[in-house]
Image: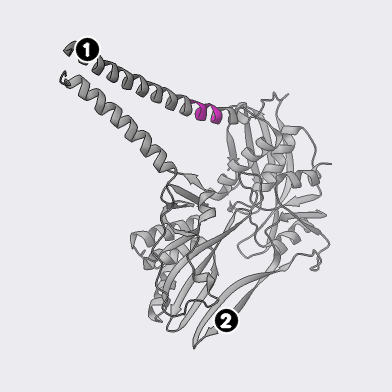
Amino acid sequence: MRRLNFLDLALVVLIALIFAGLFDISFSNNKTIAEEEPIEVSLLEEGTALGDLSLEGYSGVEVSVNPGLIQLTSECRAIILNINQDTSYSIKKGLDGDVDFRPLTHDTIKSILENYGIEVMMVKIYDLKTGTYFADLFLKKDNKILNLDTRPSDAISIAVRFDKPIYIRNDLLEAGTEVC
Amino acid sequence: MKKAEDRGSKAVLFGIFLVSLLIIFGFGVFVGIDFSFNQEENNNLGKINLLGDKETKINIVAVDDNGNGVSGLLTTQVREGTGLVLVNINDVLADYNTQFSARTAASVAGAYAGVDLSNLDVIYSIETPAQLISGPSAGSAMAVTTASLLQDKEINPNIVITGSVLENGDLGGAGAVIEKAKAAQEAGATLFLVPNNVEGLSYQEEKSCEHYDGNEYCRVTYKASKINGEENLDIKIKQVGNINEAMEIFYL
C-alpha cells in the first residue's frame, strides 16, 4: 500500500478540522445555560413557602456597563437594559471597586448595610413588563431575610459592591440576543 | 497490485475531498440564506418622496427640578435628507436619554407608517422654560408626530401623551403622571395618554412577613393606586399600550 504523503495528511487534517468546526458550531448553538451553584440558605428549612429564594429556572449573569446601558450576559445570551447615566456610572464604580472623592448613593447604602451587619444575598431579575424589568434584592441579618422590590439597576449597583450573584429568569434571558 | 491499491487510496481521498466540498458549500448556502433574510427584513419599508418639508407641533409635558408639572412644545419636521435624526439644541440641551428616545421614536414611526427613513431627515425641536431636558418620556410624542407626518394625517391637538417608546412600538415607563396631567390640563388638553404600565398615580409600600420556626421572611413591594382620572382633574387620563393604540386615538 502506498504511504500517505504530506499533502494527503494535510488534506485529512483539513477535513478533520472542518468537521470539528461544524461540530463546534452545532454544539455552541444548542448550549444550555449552565446552572449556577445554588446559594446557601441555611436559615430556612426546605419546603417552606420561600419559592422566592429558589434559583430554579434562573441563570447567573455577568455584568458589563456602558454609559446608560447595562449588559447582563450568561453563556452566549445577553440582555441590555437602558438605565440612567448616573446609575451606570455607579455600577461601573462598584465593578471597579472605586469610590469617588465623595461617596455615591450606592456607596452610602453599602456602608449602612455593612455597619449594621446586613448581608446582601443576591439579586433576582424576575419579570419584564412593557419594557421595564423588575428585580428583587435579598438581604439577610441573623434569622431574618428581607426581599426588596427594587429597580434592577439599583439592585445590581448594590450587589456588585458586595460581589454577590445576580440571576435572571431564563425566559427573559432567552428573549435577549445571541452574543457568541 | 500496488497500482490498484494506490488508485483505491486516491479514490477514497478524492471522495472525502468531495464530501468536504459539499459540506462547505452547504454551510455557505446556510449562511447566505440567513444573511439575505436579514437584508429582506430591512427592505420591507417603502420610500416616500415628500413634496417639501413637513412640520407638526404637539404639546408635551414634563416635571421641573421642583417636581412641578410643566408644559412645552415639540415641533417635529420631516424633510428630504439622508436618514438623519436630529435633536435641535439651539434653545435647550438634551441629555443622552432624550437623544436615544428620539432615535427610537423615528425608527418606530417609520415602522408604523411603513416608510423607509433613509432618504429623509427627522428633526425634533423642543421649546420649554428649562435649560436642559432629560429622560425618555417625550419619545411617544416624537413617535406620534413623526408617524403623522409620514402618513400625512393630522393629529388631535387636544391630546397630550407621555412615556418612552420602545423599539417594538410599546410604550415604556413614565413618572410623575399627576403633575404632568395638571400641566397638560393647563396647556388646554382634554385627554392625557399614559403608558399601560403606569399602574397608578401614586405608589404605596406594602410589607408582608411569614414566620418559620423563629425565622422571618419579609417582602416589600410597591403597589399602585389605579388611575381613574378623577384626582381633582378636569382632564381625562387614558392608558395606551403601544404606538398603534395611540395613533388610533390621535388621528382626527
Q: Secondary structure at mark 1?
A: helix
Residue at 49% over, 50% down: A79
Q: Position of residue A58 (x, y in %)?
A: 48, 60
**Mark 1, other Cα within 10 Å: few <14 / some 14–19 / many ≥20:** few
Rendered view: B99 above or below A119: above
Mark 1–mark 2 distance (CA, rounded to whole Å): 85 Å
Q: Which stretch is magenta?
A: B32-38
Above or below A42: residue A75? above
**What amino acid type is highlighted by mark number 2?**
Cys
Name which quarter of the figure residue B199 lies in: bottom right
What number is the disc on residue B4?
1
Q: Quarter holding the N terminus of chain B?
A: top left
Q: Secondary structure at mark 2?
A: strand
How many callouts does the rendering have?
A: 2
Q: Residue furthest bottom?
A: B214
The quadrant of the image that shows the C terminus of chain B is: top right
Q: Which mark is residue B209?
A: 2
Residue at 67% from the left image edge and 32% from the top image edge: B78
Of tags 1 and 2, the one toward the viewer is 1
Q: What secondary structure predominates along the stretch shown in magenta? A: helix
In this rendering, does residue A75 appear at all?
yes
Q: In the picture shown, does residue B50 fall above or below A87?
A: above
Q: Quadrant of residue A40?
A: bottom left
Tag 1: residue type? Ala
User: Does the magenta run of residues contain B34?
Assistant: yes
| Residue B17 drawn at (x, y percent) | 32, 20
